[in-house]
């Protein structure tokens, strides 16, 4: 009996020791899992022609212009975002600034990859020895081709993405505005970005009819530059034309609360000497009229292609505007007058698409069929 008792005691001791080892191993495993969780990041990206917005942990962590400055010989990245924008149009021969996105799609593959890589580094997240495995949801124009779509995927993968999913901009904008895109009710979205204007009718989680035109914020800037050259014999750059659009841009020649006149500095085309002129919103409305007419025509064309039952829904709910271009003064009133429909401007329209992309990422299982 004594022998048996000692054997049992020894067995109990070994069992307790084994349990301790198991618990220690389990604790280590859990700690390791917690450690490795920091190496997995899920981010939503609005890779726009004018600006790139990144959402991480339900917050906008990066909001920078889509521009990069490189050293010509080596290709070394010197600056991205705001700092690169300050250099745009002022660089010496050994430095070049590139806007790799054009008309909503990738125009320079390598520059896009470098831009995305540098912007991802700006995300405020715990530092790790190994690079994190990234899961990305990126929004793309609805009129994009398969080749252009492949370029977006490849750029994201080269920038470090483990998994890449894409969502169309008008769908992301609708989600970001707060519309229930899954219900059997039609909604029309007009998303005016930097490179493209996306007009889409959405119902039951899909785009029923859409129209994508490459007339948007960048085209507005070109219209302003051309107007200044022809009307005032003055040459201005991209940054100045953007400032004019923001300060005195208008879609209507008459506004209830007009902005103050804006002083513009540029180079006189006749003498070559720098000079300053003053412009008002009515002049800019005249400069932008041609491009706005094309957007109006695209909206009317999308309405013509809409099925009758959805047209009845749109008559009740109206049209929703998103994107930076929708902030142009009087644009909502002009489209409302043209279509005879109510027009609603989204809250914070600049980030509506990015916000919707972030919501789609967070509710990935719910919106699986919207994301490809």
Image (cartoon, rainbow, N blue to C red):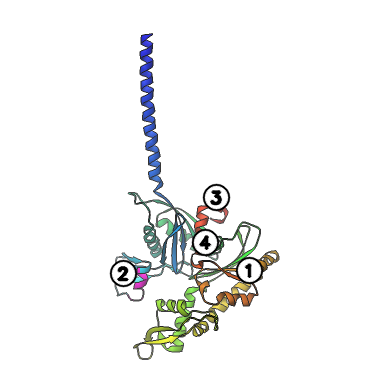
Residue 55 appears at what percent x and percent y? 45, 58
Query: How many neighbours does mark 2 have within 10 angstroms: few (below 14), some (14-19), or many (20 or more)?
Result: few
Q: Which mark is residue 146?
A: 4
Q: Are marks 3 and 4 in contact (CB under 8 Å)?
A: no
Q: CA distance from mark 3 to mark 4?
A: 25 Å
Magenta-colored segment: predominant secondary structure: helix
Tag 1 secondary structure: loop
Query: How many neighbours does mark 4 have within 10 angstroms: few (below 14), some (14-19), or many (20 or more)?
Result: few
The residue lying toward the viewer, choosing from 182 and 233, is 182
Q: CA distance from mark 2 to mark 3?
A: 45 Å
* Sooner in the amino-acid sequence: mark 2 or mark 1: 2
Q: Which mark is residue 365?
A: 3
Q: Are marks 1 and 3 in contact (CB under 8 Å)?
A: no
Residue 151 appears at what percent x and percent y? 46, 61
Tag 3 secondary structure: loop
For disc 1, the marked residue is 318
Res 185 → quadrant:
bottom right
Q: CA distance from mark 2 to mark 1?
A: 50 Å
For disc 2, the marked residue is 72
Q: CA distance from mark 2 to mark 4?
A: 31 Å
What stretch of residues is rendered in magenta?
A: 83-90
Residue at 33% from the left image edge and 66% from the top image edge: 79
* Sooner in the amino-acid sequence: mark 1 or mark 4: 4
Residue 90 appears at what percent x and percent y? 33, 76
Residue 347 appears at what percent x and percent y? 53, 66
Q: In the figure, is residue 182 to the left or right of 215?
A: right
Tag 4 secondary structure: helix
């Amino acid at each position: 009996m004594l022998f048996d008792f000692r054997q049992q005691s020894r067995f109990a001791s070994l069992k307790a020791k084994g349990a301790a080892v198991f618990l220690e191993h389990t604790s280590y495993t859990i700690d390791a899992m917690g450690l490795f969780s920091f190496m997995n990041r899920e981010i939503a990206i609005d890779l726009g022609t004018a600006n790139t917005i990144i959402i991480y942990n339900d917050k906008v962590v990066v909001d920078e212009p889509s521009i990069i400055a490189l050293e010509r010989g080596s290709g070394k990245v010197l600056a991205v975002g705001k700092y690169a924008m300050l250099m745009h149009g002022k660089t010496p021969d050994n430095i070049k600034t590139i806007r790799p996105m054009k008309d909503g799609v990738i125009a320079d593959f390598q520059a896009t990859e470098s831009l995305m890589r540098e912007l991802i580094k700006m995300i405020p997240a715990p530092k790790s020895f190994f690079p994190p495995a990234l899961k990305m949801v990126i929004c793309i124009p609805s009129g994009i081709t398969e080749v252009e779509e492949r370029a977006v995927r490849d750029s994201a993968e080269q920038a470090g993405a483990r998994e890449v999913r894409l969502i169309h901009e008008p769908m992301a904008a609708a989600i970001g505005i707060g519309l229930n895109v899954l219900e059997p009710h039609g909604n029309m979205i007009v998303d005016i970005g930097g490179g493209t204007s996306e007009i889409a009718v959405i119902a039951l989680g899909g785009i029923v009819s859409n129209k994508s035109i490459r007339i948007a914020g960048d085209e507005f800037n070109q219209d302003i530059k051309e107007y200044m050259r022809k009307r005032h014999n003055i040459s201005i750059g991209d940054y100045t034309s953007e400032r004019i659009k923001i300060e005195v841009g208008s879609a209507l020649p008459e506004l209830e609360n007009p902005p103050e006149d804006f002083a513009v500095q540029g180079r006189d085309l006749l003498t070559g000497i720098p000079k300053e002129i003053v412009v008002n919103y009515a002049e800019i409305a005249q400069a932008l009229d041609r491009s706005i007419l094309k957007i109006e025509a695209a909206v009317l064309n999308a309405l013509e292609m809409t099925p009758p039952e959805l047209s009845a829904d749109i008559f009740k709910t109206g049209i929703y505007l998103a994107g930076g271009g929708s902030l142009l003064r009087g644009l909502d009133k002009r489209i409302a007058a043209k279509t005879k429909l109510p027009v609603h401007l989204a809250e914070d329209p600049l980030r509506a698409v990015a916000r919707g992309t972030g919501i789609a990422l967070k509710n990935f299982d719910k919106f699986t069929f919207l994301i490809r």
